[in-house]
Amino acid sequence: MSKLLLQPGWPRFALFVLCTCSVGILAAQDIKNNPNSNHGNKFEALGTILPSPNEYRTASGAPGPKYWQQRCDYDITCNLDEDKLLLTGSETITYFNNSPNELTYLWMQLDENEHSSKYNANYQDGSSLPHVVSDQNLSRLGNASEQNDFGDHIVKMTDALGKPLQYLINKTMMRVELPTPLKPGMKFIFKVDWNYKVTDRKTLGGRGGYEYFPDDGNYLFTMTQWYPRLCVYSDFQGWQNNQFTGRGEFALTFGNFNVKMTVPADHVIGATGQCQNYQQVLTPAQFNRWQQAQTAKEPVEIVTLAEAKASEVKKNKAKKTWIFKADNVRDFAWGSSRKFVMDAMPTYVEGKKVMCMSYYGKEAYNLYRRFSTKVVAHTIKTYSHFTIPFPYPVAQSVEASNGMEYPMICFNFGRTEPDGTYSEATKYGMLGVVIHEVGHNFFPMIINSDERQWSWMDEGLNSFVEYLTEERWDNHFPVRGKGPAWAIVDYMKLPKDQLEPIMTNSENINQFGPNAYTKPATGLNILRETIMGRELFDYAFKEYARRWAFKHPTPADLFRTMNDASAENLDWFWRGWFYGIEPVDISLDSVKHLVPDFDSPIHRKDTTVMTSIDKPLPDGKFPTDVSKERNREDKSIVFPTDADTALHDFYWKYTRGQIPYDTTKYPQHIEGIPMGRFTAPDEPMDDATREAVKKKQFYELQFSNKGGLVMPIIIEWTFTDGTKEVERIPAQVWRKNEGHLTKVFAKDKEVASIKLDPNRETADIDESNNSFPVVQTESKFQVFKSRQAAPRAIPQGNNPMQLTGKEKKAF
């Protein structure tokens, strides 16, 4: 358009446009020089908000030439007494001081003290009396002040020669006094004996403990945060000193583990790392199946459902010791139960075999047998595509009616009804949690951020790649909010006194889920799909993962790397989305239409946008999702649910209309846009220019930034001939005036209607001011009432996947 304006013979109205732009520039300069204006803040560099670069962490976001981190190796033996619900352990710890500093003490985490009435972190919130007095409420209030004997009991602590060491327990931390200062480059070996009562995870909460099954009288143990372990000592904060309250998770040091676990002989164990003695702890038949699984194309049951059910009844009182080894990991966890079915199959990441495995009781069999191990394999491969190749030999999923992650193993939910049926919500909830928890192998188990300080670097980054992985599992995956911009809108609409910046410590967040999970995940997806584009984003994100694999990144390292690897100054986005709480609300305030007419006096008719009501929900079962659309167009993506017919359960077919369901669409009424005409008086113009100008339709749009958060402007033009065009204007268009923008567009065809952000990519909280003319829509309540209840998959006979009745005929 700028080239056309410079052509000789251009009519006078062009000078009007040029003059208007000049006035706008002068006005912007006046605003900039106004000391009462905040103009420019949104596009200023983050500057001193970020820590100063140094020889440990560079301005590019990469580790510096003198970057260092500590290392800690563990040799642990433990015994699980199922009758007494007691875990007893002894560990030898080798701590390497790779820092440039001399250390006089070490800090350790005693996370089991979370349950102790004496040594818990004692971070209290406000409370109030219940509105309804009941036995349950009174019991809850009474238990809050009850004394107990839970938490870590330190029996003995000595150096390598057996000499006692002094120590002090401060809540969930323990300081170990070193007999002599630990100089740089030296190591210190010491031993700790301990025990603790295993808690009932279902009643007391927490990530680890036991679950009791009264129907068959058995236990399922998830042993997590179970051993005293070293805190992180780092260049950016010294010793990690945030107590464990149950929310902020774990900043940990990398090292090598050798662990021996003695448990009831009929228990099956899944744990971090590789088992070193399967031939001794499995039966000959089970070990033979394990060998078959090494080259299997489908999951092989190592421990079968029939064997697990038999063990539930017999309850062997003998003991067996399982031995696991794991190198270069930051933690170790394990699950143990006689209820476990165990299956396995390999997948391959850049030619390297990874054994994908699942453990689950009969209560989850119909879901986990079909999906779990396959979705573990899909997750490992997809995360490897977006970050770095998965470096470990094993990835495991354990059904334990919760969701928590550790290196090479995670605990997930997903049980069927007693008759073996499962709802669609349970299926997708199970798939989502397995993807999420397996994905945590990458964030933060490998790219090892400080979860105790910045939960979003753990949960938010992982939720973002979880979203990408779900989309690549099935392009009809019903994503629940960890990615699509429209899904964060309700949170962004909240009053400002209910919002905190993403850059808030985890213990201080009110809206923890949206703040730590969905808002950062959504922000990264907006960067990828709307601001940077997939190619630039994916390259920069992979570079961040490559730079900080097996290291301790901070937010500044992420922000700087994304800028550095993309040649995009994204400080405005980090400032607004991560440090601020302002929402997106871009309003289309007015539309002016100009048609060149060389035969009439100049006149112009202006029109003003009127407000519309809520935007309608998208047609069909799933919302419009730009990521799904692009995935569908990308022929290089092969969705596992398309390639593997074994994954086609009832809900897969139901979603695609192979089982009939209501597809009612809601009509939208759009009126023609009011049109005006610009005309120009006689002026010298050559015929070619005159004809070119006559064919143009000019539109002047006025926008206001009502929400405060700057964002690209996405315009969908609908022309009178029914065709559409989407035009994208980068966020930098706001840099000279963050509140208001006027922009002229030249079109070859007459416009019938205009819509901002047609695919809901920017998390705009008010879509009523996004259209011209007004679009009348159904209310959300009317749409909700018209939805049909989703049917349920019903197993039959010996085949837990088989359906009956109408559902079977529909196949």
Image (cartoon, rainbow, N blue to C red):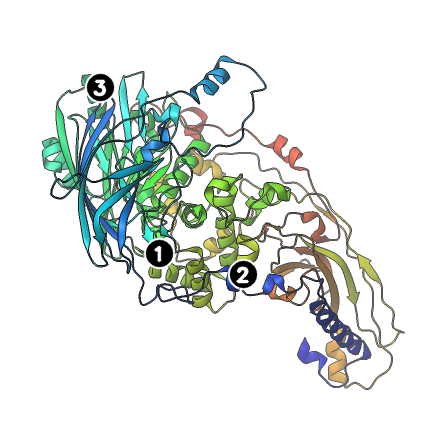
Above or below residue 416? Residue 442 is: below
Q: Which residue is mark 3?
A: 83
Q: In the image, what residue occupies the spot 22% across and 53% down?
A: 182
Q: Quadrant of residue 374?
A: top left
> x%, y% of residue 718?
68, 58
Q: Please state which of the two labelled residues, at mark 3 or mark 2, is closer to the viewer.
A: 3
Amino acid carrying label 2: it is Ile
Q: Does residue 802 appear to the left or right of 629 in the view shown?
A: left
Density class for disc 1 (Cα within 10 Å; few <14, some 14-19, many ≥20) is some
Q: Quadrant of residue 265?
A: top left
Q: Earlier in the sequence, mark 3 or mark 2?
A: 3
Q: Which residue is farthest top?
A: 135
Q: Earlier in the sequence, mark 1 or mark 2?
A: 1
Density class for disc 2 (Cα within 10 Å; few <14, some 14-19, many ≥20) is many
Residue 531: mark? 2
Q: In the image, what residue occupies the spot 10% across and 36% down?
A: 279
**Which sits in the foreground, 421 or 437?**
437
Q: Quadrant of residue 459?
A: top left
> x%, y% of residue 12?
81, 79
Amino acid carrying label 3: it is Asp
Q: In the image, what residue occupies the spot 60% across and 45% down?
A: 492
Q: In the image, what residue occupies the spot 87% across and 76% down?
A: 599
CA–CA distance in space, label 3 to label 2: 58 Å
Residue 730 seen in the current view: no
The kind of secondary structure element at disc 3 is loop
The kind of secondary structure element at disc 1 is helix
> x%, y% of residue 123?
45, 34
> x%, y% of residue 130?
56, 20
Figure quadrant of the C terminus: top left
Amino acid carrying label 1: it is His
Above or below residue 598? Residue 163 is: above
